[in-house]
Image (spheres, helix red, strand yellow):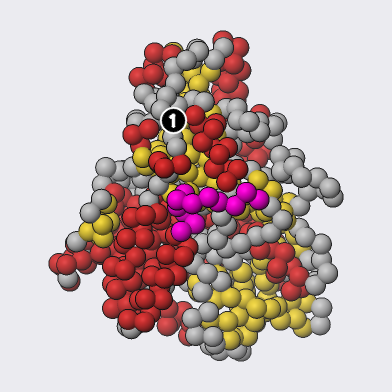
Amino acid sequence: MKPNREKLIDNISNPAIEWDIIIIGGGATGLGTAVDAASREYKTLLFEQSDFAKGTSSRSTKLVHGGVRYLAQGNIGLVREALHERGLLLKNAAHLVKNETFIIPVYSWWKAAFYTIGLSVYDLLAGKLSFGRSKFISKEEILSRLPGIDPKNLFGGVLYHDGQFDDARLAVNLAQTCIEQGATVLNYFRVAGLIKTGTKVTGVDVTDVETGKSYQINGKVVVNATGVFVDVVLRMDEPHKKPLVRPSQGIHLVVDSAFFPGSDALMIPETDDGRVLFVVPWHGKLLIGTTDTPLDEHSLEPRALETEVDFVLRNADKYLSKTITRDDVLSVFAGLRPLAAPAEGSKSTKEISRSHKLILSPSGLITITGGKWTTYRKMAEDTVDAAIRVANLIPQNCLTANLPIHGNMPDVDRTDYLYVYGSDREALLKLVDENPAWSQKLHPAYDFMKAEVIWAVRNEMARTVEDVLARRIRVLFLDAKAAIEMAPIVANLMAKQMDYDKAWEVTQVAAFNEVAKGYLLTEKLSKN
């Protein structure tokens, strides 16, 4: 089913309609909740103030994983749940999720034994949904598989399997799945307030960001799935409520794959702050991250700090044979994790659980927070189960464990960069029959073509140049300078499709360039 924005907006134009479930937030959790609710045949509505996955959900390490470090912390329950969900994602979004091999370098026999035993437990917890058995490998094999690693004092390594995916592409596919299941989902609709009948939340005041038009929407239950913004919505309900979450920032650097050629990923087991660091091949580049920096405020467009960039470069340099400098970084992006607020006076984020948390306010508002991409489906299931109880909906069983996500297609050809479109690939290519010029590249250094912009507008609910370059074709995350160079072409193509004038193009390019500057390391970043 092709998304039609006018029809979707028309669905909310009748104020007399009462929705079963209204969801605020179009990231992984919100979209997952909408898919779950709609597939159970509840009348489902979702609003996102910006674009789908604009925040945290497009800024992950691109891993679908159980969390090796959570196992080291003894959080067996979270790891088992995440490994189960990892297996379901590989089945239901096979075009975007792949089995990736990771190698942990070790420098002593006892570290080799430690990681081999630990990862054997990891494999056991995955059960029938295991991605493959972990094993010790020799120094010679590591040097063969990871030619970019520093061989000094290397004893050997442990190879294990986990998942990798494209986060924003999965979010877009979830939005499409929502619509196919009968939900109404709208990006660029900002919830400005909650409607109350007595003490109970019975709807939302929402504004169309593009037109300024406001709507009052009635619902049996409202779900707050806004990630790092959950406190904003909670205070709409209870103005003096103490903060529930504390944002923690994680950054990633993207460099050319020549620094670390090969198809295997590297997990650096010990960083300066006792965390792990990943070096992962992704869309022909190399993704290095992440950090864990507590912040006091949240933002839709967080910026990497100078100290974080130095941290990633310094720790990667200990393991790579070729030093990566600031000049080598093609893009740097930051994301905020919605972690439970720590105890008063505490600055540590290591003590904060990554498990998700479901909160029911006295008003009936349901808040879902925490968790991670890998467990989005289980978070959604728990949220809809809670909504059924709160709103006294007729109970229906959850179907999402076996529900294919839009685009799902096994055995995609990953040497063809269009594999991310899955079952949509052929339809996208047919756009060239409509206009042969759309087969032209957007940039001489990249394969991305004009037809993808048309597809994003017509089929993937892209509304801005940033939507296309950041979250549909991902080039802002891969090469920010190239993305800036593509922006005028993308703006022109979009304007023609959406019937906008030249002034819109100019405004869009300027707005995108302002955002994209934050992904470049051409100037010093903030120290704070």
Residue 45: tell me if it is visible: no
SS of the residue at dot 1?
Answer: loop
The amino acid pointed to by label 1 is: Thr
- Residue 197 lies in quadrant: bottom right
The residue sitting at 61% across, 69% down in the picture is 23
Side of 21 relative to 165 (left or right): right
The residue sitting at 58% across, 37% down in the picture is 311
- Residue 413 lies in quadrant: top left
In which quadrant will I find the N terminus? bottom left
Crowding at dot 1, Cα within 10 Å, few <14 / some 14-19 / many 20+, comes out as: few
The residue sitting at 80% across, 71% down in the picture is 238
Q: Position of residue 310 (x, y in %)?
A: 55, 39
Q: Position of residue 300 (x, y in %)?
A: 57, 63
Instruction: Name the magenta segment's main secondary structure.
Output: loop
Q: Is residue 137 above or below residue 27?
A: above
Give yes or no for residue 374 being in the magenta stretch. Answer: no
Residue positioned most to the top = 109
Q: Position of residue 205 (x, y in %)?
A: 64, 82
Residue stretch in magenta: 517-528
Q: Is residue 213 above or below residue 400?
A: below
Q: Position of residue 97 (x, y in %)?
A: 42, 45
The residue sitting at 62% across, 37% down in the picture is 79
Residue 210: tell me if it is visible: yes
Question: How many numbered markers are drawn?
Answer: 1
Residue positioned most to the front = 523
Q: Is residue 70 above or below residue 437?
A: above
Q: On the image, numbered disc 1 is attached to which residue?
A: 323
